[in-house]
Image: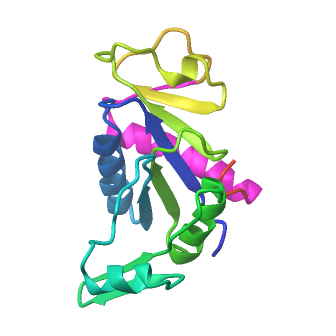
Amino acid sequence: MPGTPRIHLVGRRNAGKTTMVCALIRELTERGYRVASVKHTHHHHELDTPGKDSHRHRTSGAVATGILAPQMTALFIPSESAVRTDDRYVAFENAFADSDVILVEGDLQTTGTRIEIWRSGLTEPPYAVADSGIRAVISDVQPDGVSCPWWPSASIADVATRLLQVWSGLKETGKSAS
């Protein structure tokens, strides 16, 4: 269904975002949930390998290019830089319609629900110190200067339960991103 709840796990470089996203995917999947994921990056990457047929199709002007292999399906949709990232998540919501939740690693600028990953070994404070839009901070210690809830990172099961509470709230309000 369009409107699948989408939760962004954001944080500074080396905060442990990928580790946390993977752990949450495993935990939620073990609980029977269907989890889709998106990796957001603000760096330009050529995701479709230059020289391959699919890349040639796309650079020839195709508005979208797909790759269908026995064990994998991929879709590449070029977008103009003027298109807002939040608008582009609609394509994922449609493609991931059979999922219960979409976990996005990154995208601090989204208007969507954001939960920050932070750890005490970082030299910079959590984004949540200055960004009141962050709903919670997952960390090994309670960070100073944040007004949102702190979720201890020691127990992935507890973090997943808290995430499910946020997710339930999104489902009840019919919101996928706010």
Taking the magenta stretch, the answer to whether it contains residue 160 is: yes
Determine the residue positioned at 52% across, 61% down.
101
Determine the residue positioned at 66% across, 61% down.
87
Taking the magenta stretch, the answer to whether it contains residue 6 is: no
Rendering coords of residue 158 (x, y %)? 40, 38
Q: Main secondary structure of the magenta part?
A: helix
Rendering coords of residue 174 (x, y %)? 74, 60
Determine the residue positioned at 54% across, 30% down.
136
Rendering coords of residue 3 (x, y %)? 66, 66
Question: What is the image's colouring?
Answer: rainbow
Tell me: 67 left or right of 111. Answer: left
The quadrant the N terminus occupies is: bottom right
Q: Which residues are magenta?
A: 149-174
Q: Nearer the viewer, residue 146 or 127?
A: 127
Q: Quadrant of residue 76?
A: bottom left
Rendering coords of residue 96 (x, y %)? 51, 73
In the picture as drawn, the residue positioned furthest to the front comes out as 60
Q: Is residue 161 above or below residue 101?
A: above
